[in-house]
Amino acid sequence: MKLQVSVLLVAWFGVLGCVQAEFFTSIGHMTDLIYAEKDLVQSLKEYILVEEAKLSKIKRFHSWASKMEALTSKSAADPEGYLAHPVNAYKLVKRLNTEWSTLEDLVLQDSAAGFIANLSVQRQFFPTDEDETGAAKALMRLQDTYKLDPDTISKGELPGTKYQAVMSADDCFGMGRSAYNEGDYYHTVLWMEQVLKQLDAGEEAVTTKAQVLDYLSYAVFQLGDVRRALELTRRLLSLDPSHERAGGNLRYFEQLLEEERGKMASNQTEAGQAPQDSIYERPADYLPERDVYESLCRGEGVKLTPKRQKRLFCRYHDGNRTPQLLIAPFKEEDEWDSPHIVRYYDVMSDEEIQRIKEIAKPKLARATVRDPKTGVLTVASYRVSKSSWLEEDDDPVVARVNRRMQHITGLTVKTAELLQVANYGMGGQYEPHFDFSRNDEQDVFKHLGTGNRVATFLNYMSDVEAGGATVFPDLGAAIWPKKGTAVFWYNLLRSGEGDYRTRHAACPVLVGCKWVSNKWFHERGQEFLRPCGSTEVD
């Protein structure tokens, strides 16, 4: 029996080894963790039954293993659907990185070689601290973008979810601690307050109120709220009078307030005064259009006025009488008038989508961006997904889809980039960016020798239950994913100058598993297919 379980685990971890680390950046890859955890649970139950007599310390994990068995049976039946709920995805990463590690430490106290071999040796393929931090950041990103409070996330009350998922006080404490370790005191406060709320409601947890108050008091101090930091420290000392650090902090906070009172002017608010209801503002960041971008992601601020809407039409598109499209033209719908953005329907069949996903999944790697200064590809926090590049030789379906995009656009794919397939992870996103290289980035595509990216053809290969829109902040436009459809726009004006209105973004996926593929057409070879205009702005 031990040998059989070991073989099963080695088989699964062989798959995981190919895609090690950064699981949180791709829901497609996280599905492998579902099966790995299911096998671990089964291995654990068998181990307990065999070793129960001598491993008394393990007995308390039996009920936990049963609960995990029920959970993994449900999750394994529909991995992508289960992981579509971001709380489920976060808790999966947290369990494998933290809770199973705790179990490992306990088992190591006994001579249980079989289970230790399965768990300890193969743990190298588990999610890492980086994954757990990335998963926590993803939930915070969703919290900010879609204006969700921690209580809503903790209860799992998200739109479009078909699986129930709640966060315990210990889970919420893990979120707050992740934020604290990253120096993010704004989210530390929000999540530590949620822990207190759940503990005050009588929830049982490993985390104590004293632990929470220790983090919370320092976080509010870092946000400039000395008065509340003092209040929380006093509360901490009432629970744990011997807390050494709290005693020192109490004296320091009292001294600060006393100094500020001495400097206080008669017409000024007392320094250190807590904001009303202890609500803190979210810190500003590097993205100037953050508010506009996130509003569009929520479906707010879309500038599709009645006047503009009258200029948008639907039609059948035959690619200027392309022979292949005369008998079966595509449905074309205007999404925006200027710049012209169109959506095509029934571009890819379900069978084609499934095949492309199968080919792409083993090749998925963390999506990169090109550093505008060095031209070197690197990962970035503002692009959370995994992608792969498919050649026509990989499968006939790739060549077929490439030809179809050529027929629809009237542009040649000979100088286009390979078909890129992307799968978005927890809170997967790509913040506002240009597809074309700007004047200060002229060498970005020099190695290709095909000029700049003249146009983008974006295929939606899945529906998304909530979030995941493609938005254009400068336009006030939002385009929602629909499986089997594709959107197309030109990145360059006919003069060859970049159309800066096409700055766009992929909004964080709130609920769902988002798959897309895209083709970037380049300038060379399009000279007679899309002639230059007579002016710079044509």
Image (tube, rainbow, N blue to C red):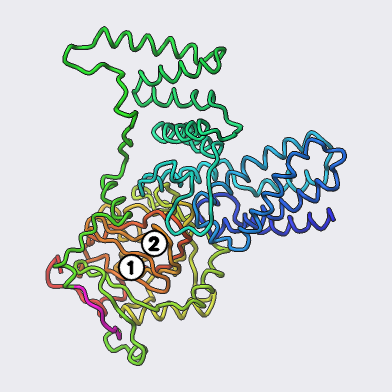
Residue type at numbered disc 1 = Thr
N-terminal of the two: label 2 or label 1? 2
State the residue lying farthest toward the front: 202
State which quadrant residue 346 falls in. Answer: bottom left
Residue denoted by label 2: 447
Residue shown at 28% from the left, 69% from the top: 489
Front disc: 2 or 1: 1
- Residues shaded magenta: 312-318
Please rate how many residues cluster around mark 2, counting C-alpha atoms within 10 Å: few if below 14, some from 14 to 19, many from 20: few
Residue 431: in sight, yes or no?
Answer: yes
Point out the image quarter for the N terminus.
Answer: bottom right
Nearest to the observer: residue 416 or residue 358: 358
Q: CA distance from mark 2 to mark 1?
A: 20 Å
Residue denoted by label 1: 456
Q: Position of residue 468 (x, y in %)?
A: 39, 59
Residue shown at 14% from the left, 65% from the top: 536
Instruction: Tell me: residue 327, above or below residue 208.
Output: below
The disc label shown at residue 300, or none: none
Q: Position of residue 63 (x, y in %)?
A: 72, 45
Nearest to the observer: residue 454 or residue 26: 26
Nearest to the observer: residue 479 or residue 7: 479
Q: Secondary structure at mark 2?
A: loop
Q: Position of residue 396 (x, y in %)?
A: 52, 80
Point out the image quarter for the C terminus.
Answer: bottom left
State which quadrant residue 305 falls in. Answer: bottom left
Judged left or right of residue 497, residue 210 is right
Q: Position of residue 14 (x, y in %)?
A: 69, 57
Residue 437: in sight, yes or no?
Answer: no
Residue shown at 44% from the left, 32% from the top: 193
Residue shown at 41% from the left, 48% from the top: 142
Residue type at numbered disc 2 = His
